Image (cartoon, grey):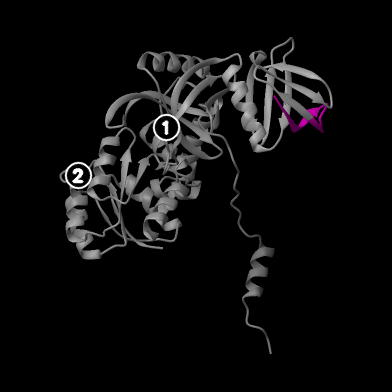
Amino acid sequence: MGRILIVDDTLFMRTLLKNILFSGGHDIVGEAGDGDEAIAKYQELKPDLVTMDVVMPKVNGIEALKGIRAIDPNAKVVMCTAVGQEQMVKLAIKTGAKGYIVKPFQAPKVLEEIKNVLSS
Amino acid sequence: MALVPVKIEKDGKWLVGKIDLQQDSMNVVEPFKAAIPYKSVIDLEEKKNVLIITVKGDPPVIYRIASVEKVLQAMKRFIAMSCSAYRLMAYFMSPAVRGGVMVTNATWEKGAIAVLKSTIWFVSQNKQVSVALKEVTSMEITKKEVQKNQVDVLKLDHMENTDVVTSYVLCPLSTLQILINFLKDATKDLEITGEELDPVAAQVGMLIYSGMDSHAIEKMLNIPYKNLDEIYEKLLKLGMAEVTQVRREVQLTPKGVRFITESVKPPTQ
């Protein structure tokens, strides 16, 4: 089980992910609504894993991923993308994302992916 | 070509038998005799390890056949490649995404797509995947990167047990357009018509999709059960959801209250 930081600009998606991850026994150590906040919270909270939305206002998920990797090259970040953002997925993986999930998602599969990334 | 062991259903009973698999037909040789030319097959469904083969006739004849995976694989391949269906040669990737998570090691398979009465078959030498048309949730032509090129593919979302699965079909765009038109026609009963969902109902739909139960949805959206029930009713009427269970809320009677009160009293010396 891990300490997880959830990054998404919509409260609805954050709440949904929080519920799913909590039901899987994970601790939600923080939430962020944009990339800047994500980098700051990562530095402050040092979570085991970050779920990161790709499309966000101000600093997007890819830039935030770069920022987090600059602080911690071993950071475990799972990107959350909407369907049809495959280019973003490729870019995220090149940038160092450890996994990716596509919205809309199903709870058991998300938990499986998170477990895989945490144990990698 | 090959005599294979099977179990075949006759008059509601499963009988041990043998089928001779040929290039253009399969012939039941035991426990009864029947010739099934592949081109006479109008539908092929798979349920667990049973193949349901519908052969044209008036009325159509249905065979239910069970066997080991290797035998079923050969049957599926022969039938899907030769039966009476809309068929095209294509590359396919199935499953590519399951429940929102990319399937690792998903690869393009070179084979054929066959659209039958109730099922779409993806068939290659090593893999046969069936998707019931009634389980298709959406389809669109989209771009996907293949060998560093952006190419047109058909993206097909469908249910597999309780998982939502995405599969891709790759072939020339003109063929994809024919395929999607054919599939749209074959699944027109599933098209959403009538009123659209309001934002809250759409959020409820998203939460159901993600596996949340009523209690979690009420808490997350901060809506009373009565409102949620109205949204459920709407989803049910639109054929977008089905009832899986009805949960009851109860309160204790005086007898129950008495029992609980007694049970928490410290034991008397």
Q: Chain of mark 2?
A: A
Question: Residue B108 shows which numbered tag?
Answer: 1
Instruction: Using residue A110 as the reference point, say whether residue B147 is left or right of it.
Output: left
Q: Nearer the viewer, residue B49 or B222?
A: B49
> Is residue B241 within the magenta segment?
no
Q: Nearer the viewer, residue A110 or B54?
A: B54
Of discs 2 and 1, which sits in the foreground? 1
Instruction: Using residue B4 as the reference point, say whether residue B237 is left or right of it.
Output: left
Instruction: Using residue B213 as the reference point, say whether residue A60 is left or right of it.
Output: left
Q: Are marks 2 and 1 in contact (CB under 8 Å)?
A: no
Query: Which range is magenta?
Result: B1-17
Q: Which residue is rendered at x = 64% and y = 66% of the image?
A: B257
Q: Amino acid at mark 1?
A: Trp
Q: Which residue is rendered at x = 36% and y = 40% of the image?
A: A102
Reading the image, the residue beneath label 2 is A60
Q: Amino acid at mark 2?
A: Asn
The quadrant holding residue A37 is: bottom left
Q: Nearer the viewer, residue A35 or A69?
A: A69
Q: Chain of mark 1?
A: B
The quadrant holding residue B43 is: top right
| Other-residue count near label 1 (Cα within 10 Å), few / some / many at <14 / 14–19 / ≥20 | some
Quarter of the image for the C terminus of chain A: give it: bottom left
Place of residue B258 in the rendered image (x, y in percent of width and height, measured from the top left): 66, 69
Q: Secondary structure at mark 2?
A: loop
